[in-house]
Image (cartoon, rainbow, N blue to C red):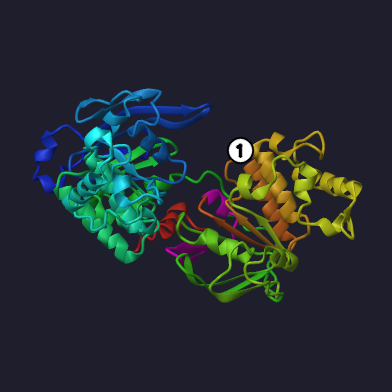
Amino acid sequence: MSDGERTVTPAPAPADDGRAAAAPPVVEATGIVKRFGPTVALNGVRITIRPGETHALVGRNGAGKSTLVSVLTGLHAPDEGTVTFGGGPAPRLSDRDAWRRRVACVYQKSTIIPTLTVAENLFLNRHHHGPHRLISWTGVRRRAQELLSAWSVDVDPQLPAGDLSVEQRQFVEIARALSFGARFIILDEPTAQLDAAAINRLFGRIRDLQHQGVTFLFISHHLQEVYEICDMVTVFRDAAHIVTAPVAELPRTELVAAMTGEAAADRRQERTGSLDECTVPALTVRGLRSDDTYTDVTFQVGAGEIVGLAGAAASGRTEVAETVVGLRAATNGDLAISGRRPRPGSVPDALAAGVGFVPQDRHHQGFVPDMSIADNATLSVPRRLGRNGFLSRGRRDRLAEGMIKNLAIKTPGPELPVSALSGGNQQKVVMARALADGPRLLVLINPTAGVDVRSKEFLLGKVEETAESGTGVLIASDELDDLRMCDRILVMFQGRVTTEIPRGWHDHDLVAAMEGVDLHA
């Protein structure tokens, strides 16, 4: 057992008066190892889930939660270790019907087909057949209504699935899973798109189903939900099992500490650059609101200041950053970049105001893969390449060569297609374009996602260097290493800025705030 690890013997599910303890686990995974090439996604992890309980699985991004789900649902075979259901071995991967009878996963992104009715979704490829093997739609609808009624799902089976709310789609998916015979359901971030009232209704349904013998594995970034709905909790960190314990016996401070571990790097030292409070702020945001994503967001980024915008996936941090750069338009409120108010929802206006931008997904938003490094790096500065619509290849290449040198991009020349570069060098090209016009404000969303350690350190160092030259920096991320250099961090939770944390924070304090946990409560 590694340092800091502890295992607590699971308590019996409260709904079974102790009888579940004598029954075999609904599912038990032991010594699970899973590799994808050189990456070890799971390193000898384990989990035991007892009948009738709701068992939480928590951990930071990259901890191995999704990989374990793929193993428990038969999408991937473990390289080492065993999985059992009810004390018996897991089915062969090819026997999909056998897997469906044992386990189902309701993913954050719905698998319901919106163009089909609820009944058609419930019994897709399992339609009721009448005479001559023709589908009996009356029979399909009747079976659907019986199924929905049996599990207290108040949805019209003839309704198009595209008309359902997020909450209704989740209930339909749960009913569909139960119709195969599964009594073990994995809920993957089920509350990410729900409001408070819908979350309460979901939790009520989970409790009802628990009492009917259904067992849940509950995956969530919101730790207060773990304490509200779950009996047991297992923590993964860095592809390894850290702790399993009854929720009631694990203080929140210990749970957060188990998730974070030790800091991987130290970027808490004061930056050499000083902030000039007399200059116009690089970014001013007042009362920004966007329906269903964020509300009443107000903050400033000073010239030369690095501000972090932290939060879990559905916190609203990414949407706020995309609003600043013009990819989204706010419903209310206003923003100014170095005193200039760009037209809402206009990327060209934001660029003209002095924004440099590194988007969340470089593959879909950051570059054109078949275009050269030179063309990608200069896409945002055509006026520097020529006049009257005519571009000079010589100017383009000279400008690109300077960027290649400045960002240490490994390439034989500026004509190489970006698709031929490694992930770290591709991200450097995206960063080069963001810095091409000497921005007054640099906005970055998850700037080191999917890059190697050396490229990560280089890119973060370049961000610090840019700030020291007087550029304001806004970093929207949930990766702690991206945020260590920040002068202060604004934490978003469920669409609101809830906490401001100054430089010198500890990992567990920031993670707790991002998960909506008050460690001092």
Residue corresponding to mark 1? 452
Q: Is residue 479 left or right of residue 258?
A: right
The magenta stretch is 480-501
Instruction: State yes or no: residue 490 in magenta.
Output: yes
- Which amino acid lies under the numbered mark 1 shown in the image of this protein? Asp
User: What residue sits 72% from the left and 45% below the top?
Assistant: 429
Image coords of residue 510 (percent x, y): 46, 57
Q: Answer with the quarter of the image where residue 451 lies.
A: top right
Image coords of residue 423 (percent x, y): 64, 38
Which one is nearer the viewer's eye here, 335 or 332? Answer: 332
Q: How many marks?
A: 1
User: What residue sits 25% from the left and 28% below the top?
Assistant: 84
Image coords of residue 229 (percent x, y): 25, 54
Quarter containing the N terminus: top left
Which one is nearer the viewer's eye here, 241 or 382? Answer: 382
Quarter containing the C terminus: bottom left
Image coords of residue 289 (percent x, y): 51, 72
